[in-house]
Image (tube, rainbow, N blue to C red):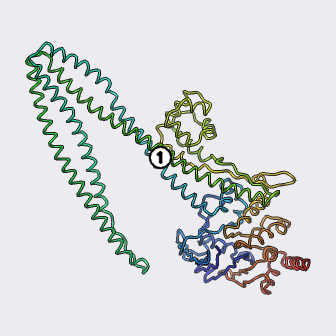
């Protein structure tokens, strides 16, 4: 892909029309003529963001140049197709005719700082990978699904705890039933007369117990149907869709309204179906309630009959009926526990499945990054060395773990680094779900009672924030300085820029835009390394630079040099052309550092070749 042109409406560059060549393009001019502004307008128009941090808010400069109401139009070319991109100062995102890969843009400050932070170094390597944004998008989608599933996991645990608490009296009730059955049997032995009545009463009580289970279940079904009808009805109160007026979108009005009407019909039919089902449930519910009243009356009649013959038998039979009913209800709850346990196991496996998919993509990314680093080490050896450690940036994991444990009452501060180092988020989910206290204690090297308290707390927490915490590869840069490799964090600004630019210029896969790459660099590096790299890169990919150093456009054989000028109120193009054009040559010699020397050096180079 290449940038073909930039057009600006309103603001400092009102009516600017700037064309670019496929190779090396250099913006030149005095201080304050807008070289940096052109670069920031390209960044803003193509939404290129900032590789040195996660913040994408780098639009302030461009918006100020556009003065609030301005607009940029950028024409791109990719595989023979033109792509039109536009963005106004008020647009949150650019508007484009088809998707495109944004260029890599570096301000002077970004060149100085990108290698200082772990995120910037990783982003720099990722800029070489064509589908890195697609992989990141997939990971974000899987993380959203993982967070939702983790939340469902903790909800199921709470439901299970409540159900188990409900069934706690079941053992006691069964023991009481045995006693009552024994007492009833004694009464039956002593009283042959009421034997048949007792049998009939037992049968009636058994029917009542089964009937009550169905009545309670129908109560739940009625509530669920009512909630469903209410939810469906709420959709009918949605606001009407706004009308579209542009010619390109006009045809959507009818389609959207038709779809909305069809949705309403479907929802109304669903409401009607559910209301019909609710009515049918009500009929059965009322029938069962009437049956219950009939059986209650029959049971009272039989108890009265038995009590006439057997002193105290009525109380035993009454309690026995109540106990049987409670046992039947709790055993029904026990079936729900089985269903919830099965669902809990399925949701846990779903969580682990999402984690496995995320780790697979991360593994692919590591392989991509490692291949890039091997290429960089091969090309930049021995001056620069790049290394990568898989999944070594654990700071976000540690922060998420600390937030989860905050307020637990446990002494966890000294444990967090140990957990982060020795137990991955996926294994933490495993230990907290299975409550493998001893295994967890061994993994951390702590006492079992401490591991028990910790896992007990984590088992009751939503681990979604921990499971989705960013765990990234760690990239490091080193520079050979006086025979020793120094980490980039120990280098001077000039040395850091040397490292960053050396890496940046090795990337041939995307358009590269840099503001004054020569700043903070010594002349030897510019002449012997930087220009060579710029010149070589420009043969395979478009490069756009701003510069005060004549060596860059002249010795870099710039295909397009743009001389910007300003009258204080507005910026404009004074002249544009290749370095061989006389007008461009005169401008370079007049305003750029080392202009005449650069042309003389190039002349001597070609003389030596003849």
Whether residue 503 is visible to the viewer of this picture, yes or no, is: yes
| Residue 537 percent across, percent down from the top left | 74, 70
| Residue placed most toward the observer, 524 or 179 | 179
Q: Residue at x 8, y 22 (%)?
A: 305
Picture quadrant where residue 85 is located: bottom right
Residue at image mark 1: 350
| Residue 201 percent across, percent down from the top left | 14, 26
Q: Residue at x 83, y 55 (%)?
A: 480
Up-down relation of residue 521 to residue 544 (above or below): above
Q: Residue at x 65, y 61 (%)?
A: 129
| Residue 46 percent across, percent down from the top left | 60, 71
Up-down relation of residue 407 to residue 450 (above or below): below
Q: Is residue 234 left or right of residue 466?
A: left
- Quadrant the N terminus occupies: bottom right
- Quadrant the C terminus occupies: bottom right
Up-down relation of residue 504 to residue 307 (above or below): below
């Amino acid at each position: 892909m290449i940038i073909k042109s930039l057009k600006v409406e309103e603001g400092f560059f009102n009516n600017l029309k700037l064309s670019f060549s496929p190779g090396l393009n250099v913006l030149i001019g005095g201080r304050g003529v807008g070289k940096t502004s052109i670069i920031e307008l390209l960044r803003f128009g193509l939404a290129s963001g900032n590789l040195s941090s996660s913040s994408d808010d780098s639009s302030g400069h461009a918006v100020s140049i556009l003065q609030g109401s301005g607009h940029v139009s950028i024409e791109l070319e990719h595989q023979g197709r033109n792509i039109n991109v536009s963005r106004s100062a008020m647009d949150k995102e650019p508007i484009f005719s088809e998707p495109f890969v944004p260029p890599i843009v570096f301000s002077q400050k970004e060149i100085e700082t990108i290698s200082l932070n772990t995120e910037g170094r990783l982003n720099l390597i990722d800029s070489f990978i064509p589908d890195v944004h697609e992989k990141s998008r997939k990971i974000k989608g899987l993380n959203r699904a993982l967070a939702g599933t983790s939340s469902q996991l903790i909800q199921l645990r709470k439901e299970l705890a409540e159900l188990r608490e409900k069934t706690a009296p079941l053992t006691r009730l069964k023991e009481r039933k045995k006693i009552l059955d024994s007492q009833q049997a004694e009464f039956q032995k002593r009283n042959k007369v009421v034997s048949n009545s007792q049998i009939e009463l037992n049968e009636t009580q058994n029917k009542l117990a089964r009937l009550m289970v169905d009545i309670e279940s129908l109560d739940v079904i009625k509530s669920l149907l009512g909630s469903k009808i209410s939810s469906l009805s709420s959709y009918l109160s949605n606001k009407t869709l706004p009308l579209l007026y542009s010619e390109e979108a006009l045809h959507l009005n009818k389609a959207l309204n038709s779809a909305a009407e069809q949705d309403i019909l479907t929802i109304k039919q669903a409401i009607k179906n559910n209301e019909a089902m609710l009515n049918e449930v009500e009929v059965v519910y009322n029938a069962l309630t009437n049956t219950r009243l009939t059986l209650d009356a029959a049971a009272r009649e039989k108890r009265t009959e038995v009590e006439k013959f057997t002193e105290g038998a009525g109380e035993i039979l009454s309690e026995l009926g109540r106990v049987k009913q409670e046992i039947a209800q709790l055993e029904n709850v026990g079936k729900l526990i089985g269903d919830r346990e099965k669902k809990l196991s399925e949701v846990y496996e779903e969580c682990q499945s999402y984690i496995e998919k995320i780790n697979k993509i991360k593994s692919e990314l590591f392989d991509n990054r490692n291949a890039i680093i091997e290429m960089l080490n091969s090309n930049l050896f021995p001056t620069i060395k790049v290394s990568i450690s898989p999944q070594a940036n654990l700071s976000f994991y540690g922060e998420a773990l600390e937030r989860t444990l905050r307020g637990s009452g446990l002494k966890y501060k000294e444990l967090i680094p140990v957990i982060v180092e020795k137990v991955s988020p996926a294994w933490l989910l495993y230990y907290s779900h299975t409550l493998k206290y001893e295994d967890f204690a061994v993994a951390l090297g702590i006492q079992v009672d401490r591991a028990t308290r910790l896992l007990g707390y984590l088992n009751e927490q939503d681990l979604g924030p921990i499971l989705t915490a960013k765990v990234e590869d760690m990239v490091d840069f080193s520079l050979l300085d006086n025979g020793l490799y120094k980490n980039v964090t120990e280098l001077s600004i000039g040395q850091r820029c040397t490292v960053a630019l050396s890496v940046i210029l090795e990337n041939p896969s995307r358009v590269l835009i840099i503001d004054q790459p020569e700043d903070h660099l010594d002349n030897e590096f510019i002449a012997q390394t930087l220009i060579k790299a710029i010149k070589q890169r420009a043969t395979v990919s478009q490069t756009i630079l701003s510069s005060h150093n004549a060596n860059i456009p002249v010795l870099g054989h710039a295909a397009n040099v743009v001389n910007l000028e300003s009258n204080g109120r507005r910026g404009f193009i004074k002249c544009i052309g290749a370095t061989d054009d006389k007008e461009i040559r005169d401008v370079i010699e007049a305003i750029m550092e080392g202009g005449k020397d650069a042309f003389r050096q190039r002349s001597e180079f070609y003389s030596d070749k003849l």
